Image (cartoon, rainbow, N blue to C red):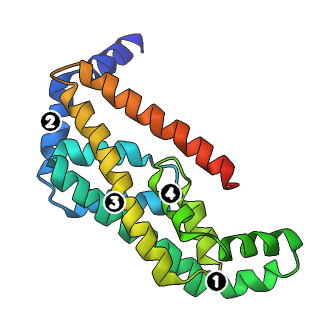
Amino acid sequence: MSAQLAEWYALFTSLAFWEGILDAFQNLGPLVPIALAALESLIPALPLVAIVTLNVAGHGALWGLLYSWVGTCVGCTIVFLFFRLVFKKAFVRWAERSEKVKKARDWVNGFNPAALFLIAILPFTPSSFVNFAFGISDFAPKKYLLTMYGAKLIMISLLALFGKSCVEALDNPLFIVLAVALILALYAVSVKVRKKNGL
């Protein structure tokens, strides 16, 4: 068993192993990286940071950024529209019995688009919760989606910078310092803004 673990460790820490995965990933075309980014909106457990990093490593900074942004926007739109068009009516009938839920809906309905934009920029904001909360609210769909598309572009650009730093770190370890510093700074800002806005 220990020999098998040692073998796996050697494999996973081998540069050739990861280069082979990236080469295979690059040959799959745009559909897979777009679908991976879209899935993050549907399955919150998937780490968007890792998905964008993989997209950037496999397709380059520009195309990796573009594929990730398109995928994130597609996933965000699907989840938001599902809750708005399918789930909202049934939920509202149930929610009317709860004062806390009604207060939460009123809070979302009166949300400032500028604050929404700022929250959506941060990669550690729970996007699935935001899509759900605004999906069952009366917040204008067009305003919500356009705000999210713009914010996601900035957020994905920051994550692409992180991904590019990780790729460059294969040749120059100093880039890993930049990558870690960037992700820690984003996390700190994310926590502060989420506390301020009650998320």
Helix, strand or loop at label 4? It is helix
Picture disc at residue 195: none
Query: What residue sits right under mark 1 in the picture?
Result: 138
Whether 164 is drawn above or below 95: the answer is: above
Are the residues at dot 3 and dot 2 in contact (C-beta closer than 8 Å)? no
Q: How much space separates mark 2 and mark 4, taking CA atoms?
A: 38 Å
Q: Residue at image x 50%, y 72%?
A: 79
Helix, strand or loop at label 2? It is helix
Q: Earlier in the sequence, mark 2 or mark 4?
A: 2
Q: How much space separates mark 1 and mark 3, taking CA atoms?
A: 24 Å
Query: What residue sits right under mark 2 in the picture?
Result: 20
Q: Residue 164's spot in the image, x, y percent?
A: 23, 38
Indicate left or right for 57 with 160 as reference: left
Are the residues at dot 4 and dot 1 in contact (C-beta closer than 8 Å)? no
Q: Residue 38's spot in the image, x, y percent?
A: 38, 63
Which quadrant is the N terminus positioned in? top left
Are the residues at dot 1 and dot 2 in contact (C-beta closer than 8 Å)? no
Helix, strand or loop at label 3? It is helix
Are the residues at dot 4 and dot 3 in contact (C-beta closer than 8 Å)? no
Which quadrant is the C terminus positioned in? bottom right
Q: Earlier in the sequence, mark 1 or mark 3?
A: 1
Q: Residue 43: tell me if it is visible.
A: no
Q: Residue 139's spot in the image, x, y percent?
A: 60, 80
Mark 4 residue type: Leu
Q: How much space separates mark 3 and mark 2, taking CA atoms?
A: 29 Å
Q: Residue at image x 68%, y 88%?
A: 89
Query: What residue sits right under mark 3 in the picture?
Result: 153
Q: How much space separates mark 4 and mark 1, taking CA atoms?
A: 20 Å
Q: How much space separates mark 1 and mark 2, taking CA atoms?
A: 48 Å
Q: Earlier in the sequence, mark 4 or mark 3?
A: 4
Picture disc at residue 118: 4
